[in-house]
Amino acid sequence: MISYFICGTARCGSSLLSRALSDTGIAGHPDEWFLTGPSDAFPPGTTHWEDGPLARYYGVIGREEYLRLVQRVGSTPNGVFGVKIMWTYFEYVMKRFHEMSRFARVSDEMIIKSTFPGLHIVHLVRNDRLRQAISWLRAVQDGVWLVSEHEPARPLAEPCFDYDVLAGMMDLIEEGEQGWLDLYKRLDIDPYVVVYEDLMTTEGYEHTVRSVLAYLDLDDTIEVPSPRAWRQADSINDEWVQQFQDWRTS
């Protein structure tokens, strides 16, 4: 069995890559199966794990049963299992594991290694952290996290430039990048690094998908599916970049 994490920070291209790998039919179905966090970070009434919509759909009521469910729905028939996790809620994921009796006195590293055998790491990084923070802030403000052919943009509000929030988000991105690197050292795993700016080009997209398949020891000669997530940046992003730079130098 092969397990792998797609790790990154917000707005790093993880949805595009996750969907591409899932659509190959041989690389598991990486998704945010372990999404969780403080209640004030989600709309009222939001639930996760054994209390969430996936568990309810399959009639799962316990956490151990939920883990088995995730292993099943996140795997392809060849036994490859994928998960997508963002640093912003990783600590809450581990807290949920530690709440289980068999993991109560076990280190994070041992939990991960025992739960996800044959673990590989695909680490996404975005070189331009300012544009990453701008994309993040816009998504938080207008509620548009993903756009595709069948998922049109339906903004809930008009985005508004905020220098201090953007600066804080850039700090969080840097903190997340370092947090992941520290974890990889503790796990003794060398991640396969995917650069957002490469992934978002036509040639880079196909090359990246094939390279990740090769890293996972899977068939990298199969047909690469068309992208199922669209780039959302527009002229507003460019304007905010200039505004941020003007504020910083003023």
Image (cartoon, rainbow, N blue to C red):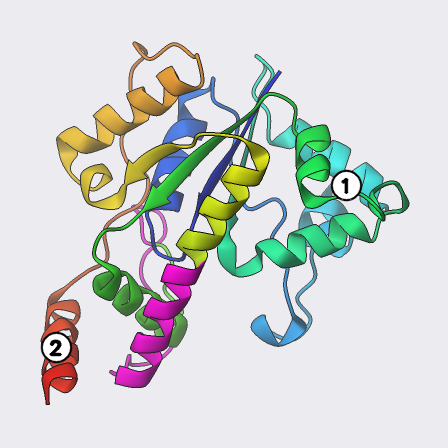
Tag 2 residue: 245
Magenta region, residue range:
147-175
Quarter of the picture holding the N terminus: top right
Specify whether 26 is left or right of 93. left
Marks 1/2: CA–CA distance: 46 Å
Q: Is residue 187 above or below residue 167?
A: above
Q: Nearer the viewer, residue 26 or 250?
A: 250
Q: Earlier in the sequence, mark 1 or mark 2?
A: 1
User: What amino acid type should be assigned to the residue bearing mark 1?
Assistant: Tyr
Q: Which sits in the foreground, 13 or 250?
A: 250
- Residue 248 placement (x, y as % from top left): 16, 82
Mark 1: secondary structure: helix
Confirm whether the magenta stretch covers residue 65. Answer: no
Amino acid type at image mark 2? Gln
Left or right: where does residue 207 sit relative to residue 191? left
Residue placed at 54% from the left, 31% from the top?
188
Which numbered marker is on residue 66?
1
Which residue: 50% across, 47% down? 182
Q: Is residue 223 above or below residue 134?
A: above
Q: Secondary structure at mark 2?
A: helix
Give the image location of residue 52, x and y in percent. 71, 54
Quick check: is 160 in the magenta stretch? Answer: yes
Tell me the quarter of the picture where residue 174 sits: bottom left
**Viewer-proximal residue among 247 and 6:** 247
* Residue 162 visible from this viewpoint: no
